[in-house]
Image (cartoon, rainbow, N blue to C red):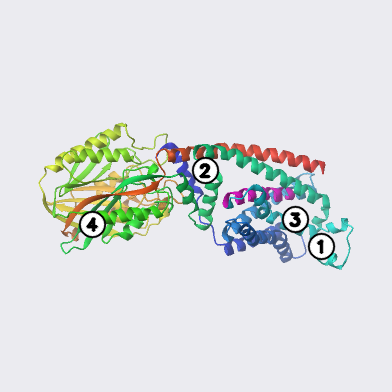
Amino acid sequence: MTATQGDLASLSRFVFRAPRWPTTAAFALVVAAVTGLGVFDTTYALEDAWQGVFYIGIPTLAAGFLTSSIDRSLGGQLTPNRSSLLALVCEVFVVVTLVAAGVAAALTPLGQNFVFDAFLAALSGIFAFRLLVVMAVSRHGALVAVVPASVQTVAAAALLFVYSGTMRYVAVEGALVDAFLSRQEQAPAALNVVVPADFGVLAAVCVVYGTAVYAFVRIIDRPWQRSLGVSVLDFLGGFIGHIADGTRELEDFFEEIGEEAVVPVTVCSIRRPDGAEKARFVLPMIHPGPMGEIGGGNLPVRVAESAEGLAFPPHATAGHDFNLVTEREVDTILSAAERAVDEVEYTDRATRSVRTTEGDASLLAQAVGDDMLSTVTYAPSFADDVSYAVGLAAAAEARSGGIDDVLLADAHNCNNGLQGEDLGHVTPGSERAFDTQHAAGAAGDRLADAERHALRVGVAWDETDWEPTEGIGPLGVRVAVFEVDDQRTAYVLVDGNNMEPGLRDRLVAGVEGVDRVEVLTTDTHIVNQVEATNQVGEAIDDGKLLSLINDLVEEATADLEPVEAGVATERAAVTVFGNDRTETLASTANAMVSMGGGLAAATTLTAMVISGVVFLLS
């Protein structure tokens, strides 16, 4: 991961799951009632709360229920969940604006008219925000999006028209008018300041704000169209769909910018003499991202569910350019893994493990028959992802000594988060790339001619009580112990995304009962739905993790039994983010965030100045 990609990953802090619409509606009514208690001043507290619900909550409920219906009738995609969440956010904005204006009016000579002007400005502001969201989610043009976007503002204005006594300024009389359009005596006295011209001002300010939103979108969209050929509204709409309903619309966006790639899927299958699979190492050369369960973020779990034996899905030598664009692509990977299992040539012979070190690269490997099972770490130095090309070159170096198939995993077990300009990405041409290749070549040379002995393997697994918010995914901690010629080698796989600096070394030094050990992570992105890093060791106690690993090593040792094993590789054609596309997306998104804030502020200030002029002239 580069620094630019790290900035993009940090946007995951904005990802959350919105509540269902009944919960949102109930909360909106509570907010409205509490606001009524603070704003209105009648004889009874319950009446104050009711007026808050009526004048503030009812427009919110109307927007929550009607916006999605109107939008869908126009061919849009707003769901009740999204509509209710949007209405609640707008209600909170209106309440905050009214409270701030009320405090200012109480402390200055501005008076009640200022509060009402602030209310009109807030109604115009939520119209502009809703317009932006509707355009993004439903891909409507600005003129069409105005219809569903205006529901909350129109509902509030309608109540204001009826209960402010505005009809007394209009020369229209009659029983129906008095019954439905003029209820001044039932409204708070503060609404008596309203005159018909105020509704003209509201409409004019809405036009100003709507125009500002349209201009903002067109300007901010240009870099996306030029560099990626997609609209920023596609990204924004997919993101909103993901946080509000958990939809896959964001994957549709990624699919538009993706490109096809052919990736090796390597499997080391271990079976008992009766043919039942005991364990399976699965290593597709893709990256399990970009975040949460989007794309291949949930790949480790899918691999575990598909394997007959206990699955070990370590991190491959691939970076964010090889993120799968949709979860559907995982099925292609799993199909290739099954084909590879069918092609495995099993043997009950293996070598003792060896560790080769070159520069920062330290590689633990052992041969299974004529194939090699290996993993590389750069600890105690910081490192993140090893690029696809570096992994392929290292595997080729190992094969040059006489090894057939190579499973080379990135241990992905020591990093300092998103700090600094260089986040530890091992790229072609770097010193670490050559270190990795030389270490793999040395391991291949040593193992090709090493003596083979009978192989015994034992496995153990604990889901753990830790949650993804604590940096541990649903696969928990898994251990495989390989015993060859009285030497025991433990492969410890933690379902997490990298490790805090120093943790890997403390774990390796503290594991008992084996001769060699390496601790790997799956790089699952399930743990990154709220935080961009959330590495193993940030939230959990090191001692508890070490104690668990030792218990699992002991359990796996007790499970040792004669087995047959073998390694095979198949290829899968999948759609990934693509070479340089991740960097382009990251730089474009980061530029939008950094520059968009200033542009939004300038646009908003301009709109507010024009609105101020409208208020002064009205």
| Percent x, y of residue 65 | 64, 62
Residue 373 colored in magenta in the image: no
How packed mark 4 is, by other alpha carbons closer than 10 Å (few <14, some 14-19, many 20 or more), is: few
Q: Is residue 253 visible?
A: yes
Q: Nearer the viewer, mark 4 or mark 3?
A: 4
Q: Which residue has dot 4 on it?
A: 342
Q: How far is the residue under mark 4 from the one under mark 1?
A: 77 Å
- Residue that numbered label 1 is attached to: 181
Query: Could you tell me which secondary element the residue under label 3 belongs to?
Result: helix
Tell me which label, 1 or 2, sits earlier in the chain: 1
Earlier sequence position, callout 2 versus callout 3: 3
Q: Inspect the image, locate mark 1, and give the three-letter code of the amino acid beneath it.
A: Leu
Image quarter where the N terminus lies is top left
Give 519 or 38, whichever is nearer the viewer: 519
**Secondary structure under badge 1?**
loop
Question: Residue 447, located in which quarter of the rendered image?
Answer: top left
Q: Residues within 10 Å of mark 3 (few under 14, many from 20)?
A: some
